């Protein structure tokens, strides 16, 4: 399973990368705005900085919603670095754009997926990744995990689709663990979710006891 970090914050990206667990990054226009990254050139410069930190797979989202605009923007984003994956919204022109990029060998991430039918369409168009949003479904009292399971069941029937399930809107560690149990290819989440997986009070307690025991042994050896 691959782990992506869902942020445009350079420090968080560097921290997750330094943990040795990071396979990629996803961003979206809201996450870029949160970092005060506005304006075409600033956005491109910021993506270039992210690409300097990680090894591969940096999702950069187009802002246009018409085919011509998405193709122009996507090609400009892809030109920043071979690490860029062009993120395209799940709309009719988005499918056409995905098909276009697939024919050019440019990887795509189809975002804002809320049904298995949408995921299937994006996969048919040649998306490298489909991004079903778990947390936003949970927000409206629908079980986001069921969507991941449903897409997984369908994709497993057709391995020739060659599209990975990128579980998105992963808000907490249980989301991430459930994604791993059902076999999502990727989960993208904020740094805090990885940190929540890392920490356990019994680990802290056990480590403190080991350190204390070693110290006592050392003191006794010095006295003998
Ligand atoms: C996915 O690529 C999105 O950036 C993201 O996961 C959305 O998460 P949210 O619903 O917590 O905003």
Image (cartoon, helix red, strand yellow):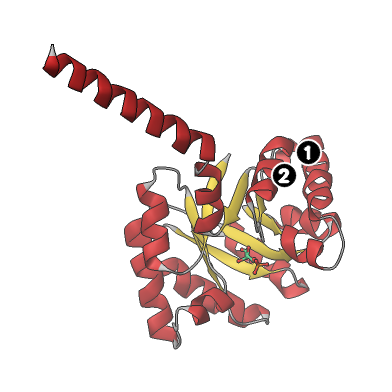
- Viewer-side residue, 97 vs 222: 222
Asked if one can make out residue 127 in the rendered structure from this viewpoint, the answer is: no
From the viewer's perspective, tell me whether residue 67 is left or right of residue 120: left
Residue 158's disc is 1
Q: Quadrant of residue 12?
A: bottom left
| Disc 1 and disc 2 in contact, CB within 8 angstroms | yes
Q: Residues within 10 Å of mark 1 (few under 14, many from 20)?
A: few
- The residue lying at 19 percent from left, 22 percent from top is 219
* Quadrant in which ligand 1 is drawn: bottom right
- The residue lying at 43 percent from left, 79 percent from top is 43
Q: Quadrant of residue 103?
A: bottom right
The percent position of residue 156, horizontal first and vertical second, equals: 77, 36
Q: With respect to residue 88, does 52 lie above or below? A: above
Residue at disc 2, secondary structure: helix
Mark 1 residue CB less than 8 A from any atom of ligand 1: no
The percent position of residue 85, horizontal first and vertical second, equals: 52, 60
Outermost residue on the bottom side: it is 39
Q: Mark 1 and mark 2: span between their CA atoms? A: 6 Å
- Viewer-side residue, 101 vs 220: 220
Residue at disc 1, secondary structure: loop
Q: With respect to residue 223, does 158 lie above or below? A: below
Q: Residues within 10 Å of mark 2 (few under 14, many from 20)?
A: some
Outermost residue on the top side: it is 224
Location of mark 2 (residue): 161
Identify the image quadrant of the C terminus.
Answer: top left
From the viewer's perspective, tell me whether residue 84 is left or right of residue 150: left
The percent position of residue 41, horizontal first and vertical second, equals: 38, 84
């Amino acid at each position: 399973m691959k782990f992506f970090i869902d942020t445009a914050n350079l420090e968080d990206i560097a921290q997750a990368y330094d943990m040795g667990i990071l396979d990629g990054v996803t961003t979206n226009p809201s996450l870029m705005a949160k970092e005060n990254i506005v304006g075409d050139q600033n956005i491109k410069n910021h993506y270039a900085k992210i690409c300097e930190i990680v090894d591969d797979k940096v999702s950069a989202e187009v802002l246009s919603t018409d085919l011509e605009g998405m193709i122009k923007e996507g090609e400009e984003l892809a030109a920043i670095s071979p690490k860029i994956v062009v993120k395209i919204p799940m709309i009719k022109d988005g499918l056409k754009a995905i098909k276009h990029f697939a024919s050019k060998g440019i990887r795509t991430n189809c975002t804002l997926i809320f049904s298995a039918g949408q995921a299937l369409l994006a996969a048919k168009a040649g998306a490298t990744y489909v991004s079903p949003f778990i947390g936003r479904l949970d927000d409206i009292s629908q079980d986001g995990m069921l969507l991941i399971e449903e897409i997984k069941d369908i994709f497993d029937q057709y391995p020739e689709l060659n599209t990975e399930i990128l579980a998105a809107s992963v808000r907490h560690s249980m989301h991430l663990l459930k994604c791993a149990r059902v076999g999502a290819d990727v989960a993208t989440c904020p740094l805090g979710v990885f940190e929540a997986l890392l920490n356990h009070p019994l680990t802290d307690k056990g480590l403190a006891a080991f350190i204390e025991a070693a110290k006592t042994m050392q003191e006794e050896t010095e006295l003998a």
